[in-house]
Amino acid sequence: MTTSPFLLILGCTASGKGAVAFELAQKIGGEILSIDSMKVYRRMDIGTAKPSLEKRQTIQHHLIDVVEPWESFSLGRYVELADSAIADMQHRQCPIIAVGGTAMYIRGLIEGIFEGPPADAILRQQLKNEAQIIGTAALHERLSKVDPEAAGRIHSNDLKRILRALEVFELAGRPISSFQTQFKSGQLRHPWRLVGLRRDKDEASRRINARVKHMVAEGLVDEMKSLLADPRGLSDQAAQAVGYAELIPYLNGKCSLEYAIEQIKINTRRLAKSQRTWFRSFPYVNWFDVGREYTQESISDALCQTFKL
């Protein structure tokens, strides 16, 4: 069987990687594998910047809309579903274009899942109770003292990953980052060629602000209202998603919409900073520095030339 191209495009939020992946898929007849911990949720469309229905009808996208917002979703489940999608595309000899910015999912997809102690339900609940009392930020501060490497990669609002990191430290007596040394091996599970789209910070911030403004104009607030109106609620992971979590205080009458929108911008920039920190540790990425003058067409053309697609 002929080996199909394996190309993975990564980048910080609002870097334009999704548009480039779509353009490239059209050029080479490929399909897109999403690597995003939030795009897996149905009905969370605007705040996750999912590709439009028209684009998804034009190009097959995998690992989008696979679970409901009230369901939990794990890295292990992602890798399982992604491997199945990859096997299907390989069988059809279809070029595979993976795209995303969720660093742990990228790591899990390309290098596997690290072996750590299994979850402890009692300890996890104790930590959740603490989070409700002292706040997620306080738990993140605690993590920074016992595992500064992990704390530097985990967003201060990402309760799920903070809980897991603290849980591993309590159970194993060593930081979660010490279990993740395999991520530095450079040994890939599939023959991926990794491409990173990199923009300077000012341009990245401009794009983030523009994206948030567009999301609000497209109906982000009403989307969140609909999610909260569902009696089944939201999973912890879904409720903590940047772009959604900030709207909960506004919808509960605790802050203004203007304040909530500004918090979305701030937290999105923080997310991008965390992503940049993660991606600097990836030793096998071909980085493309792109400016405002670059279009998805010109970038996809450059990728075709570089990798002879």
Image (tube, rainbow, N blue to C red):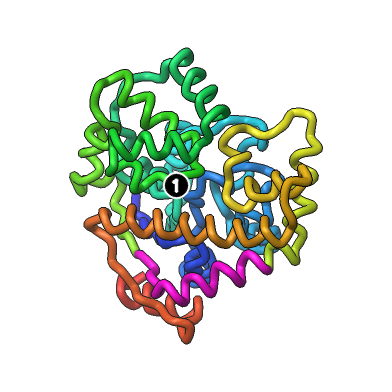
Q: Label 1's element?
A: loop
Q: Indicate the position of residue 172 as horizontal and vertical percent values.
A: 27, 20
Name the residue rendered at 27%, 37% in the picture: 177
Does the magenta portion include 210? yes
Residue carrying label 1: 155
Q: Residue furthest left?
A: 185
| Vertical order, 116 against 120 (above or below) | below
Which of the pair 119/138 is nearer the observer? 138
User: Which quarter of the figure is the C terminus placed in?
Assistant: bottom left
Q: Dot 1: few (<14), some (14–19), or many (≥20) neighbours within 10 Å?
A: many
| Vertical order, 100 against 210 (above or below) | above
Q: Indicate the position of residue 59 as horizontal and vertical percent values.
A: 59, 60
Q: Which residues are magenta?
A: 196-213
Tell me if 153 is positioned left or right of 230 in this view: left
Using the rendered view, name the quadrant where residue 163 is placed.
Answer: top left
Tell me if 70 is positioned left or right of 80 in this view: right
Mark count: 1
Name the residue rendered at 62%, 32% in the picture: 235
Q: Indicate the position of residue 99 as horizontal and vertical percent values.
A: 46, 57
Q: Indicate the position of residue 39 as horizontal and vertical percent values.
A: 58, 48
Name the residue rendered at 60%, 57% in the picture: 264
Residue 271 visible from this viewpoint: yes
Which of the pair 212/253 is nearer the observer? 253
Name the residue rendered at 46%, 57% in the picture: 270
Tell me if 253 is positioned left or right of 72 in this view: right
Which of the pair 260/203 is nearer the observer? 260
Name the dominant secondary structure of the magenta segment.
helix
Question: Mark 1: which amino acid?
Answer: His
Residue 5 visible from this viewpoint: no
Does the magenta portion include 108? no
Q: Residue furthest top?
A: 122
